[in-house]
């Protein structure tokens, strides 16, 4: 389980780029500590539990998470392919676009400002780079939800998509 009392990565305060890695159902920070994990469709992060529901259909991707307090997070596909996704986390909206039609790497922006990047690897490992471009804060729970939803749609080991 995640220790909620320790400082959370580089996304609060001064923004330094930091790489987190999803290996299986666990998210590791740069020091190798587990900062989030998924068990039985529940994402455990900080002191939150997010119930994850996803639709991995061949033509449509949709992911929804309900926080323990009732707040809803969603990620949906904007076009025929999953190259362009939109996520709504509470009142915050993010755009998650692939950087190239031939790669699964995604650029994640909030109001046009880059807040993170995601790189799925053929090994099944998924790198999530936070604090990119020295942007404004990306809330920790938002970052973990965005990264896990991208794992569901982009990871070759989980559910490959076009």
Image (spheres, rainbow, N blue to C red):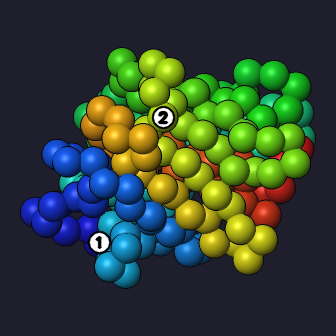
Q: How many marks?
A: 2
Residue 77, image x and y in percent? 72, 28
What is the CA distance from the residue labelled 2 to the residue labelled 1? 29 Å
Pointer 2 and pointer 1: residues touching (CB < 8 Å)?
no
User: Does 96 appear above or below 103?
Assistant: above
Relative to 133, 109 lies left or right: right
- Residue located farthest toward the bottom when viewing the structure as drawn: 32
Residue 35, image x and y in percent? 33, 67
Q: Residue at x 81, y 22 (%)?
A: 79
Q: Residue at x 61, y 34 (%)?
A: 96
Instruction: Indicate the quadrant where residue 133 lies.
Output: top left
Relative to 73, 56 lies left or right: right
Please name whichever residue, 143 or 40, is drawn nearer the observer in this view of the structure.
Answer: 143
Quadrant of the image for the N terminus?
Answer: bottom left
- Label 2 sits on residue: 114
Relative to 41, 96 lies left or right: right
Q: Residue at x 87, y 48 (%)?
A: 102
- Residue located farthest toward the left when viewing the structure as drawn: 5
User: Does 39 appear above or below 54?
Assistant: below
User: Does 116 appear above or below 85?
Assistant: below
- Residue located farthest toward the front when viewing the structure as drawn: 133
- Label 1 sits on residue: 1
Is there any visible trace of residue 99 in the rendered image?
A: yes
Please name whichever residue, 15 or 154, is drawn nearer the observer in this view of the structure.
Answer: 15
Quadrant of the image for the C terminus?
Answer: top right
Residue 18, image x and y in percent? 38, 61
The first of marks 2 and 1 along the sequence is 1
Is there any visible trace of residue 62 in the rendered image?
A: no
Q: Residues within 10 Å of mark 2 (few under 14, many from 20)?
A: many
């Amino acid at each position: 389980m995640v220790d909620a009392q320790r400082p959370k990565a580089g996304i609060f305060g001064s923004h330094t780029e930091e790489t987190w890695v999803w290996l299986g159902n666990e998210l590791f920070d740069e020091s190798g500590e587990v900062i989030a994990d998924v068990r039985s469709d529940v994402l455990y992060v900080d002191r939150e539990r997010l119930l994850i529901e996803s639709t991995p259909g061949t033509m449509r991707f949709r992911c929804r998470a309900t926080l323990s307090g009732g707040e809803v997070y969603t990620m949906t596909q904007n076009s025929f392919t999953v190259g362009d996704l939109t996520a709504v986390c509470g009142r915050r909206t993010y755009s998650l676009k692939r950087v190239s039609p031939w790669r699964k790497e995604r650029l994640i922006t909030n109001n046009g400002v880059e807040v993170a990047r995601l790189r799925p690897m053929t090994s099944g490992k998924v790198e999530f780079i936070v604090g990119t471009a020295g942007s404004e804060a990306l809330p920790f729970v938002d970052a973990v939800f965005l990264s896990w939803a991208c794992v569901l749609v982009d990871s070759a080991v989980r559910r490959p998509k076009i």
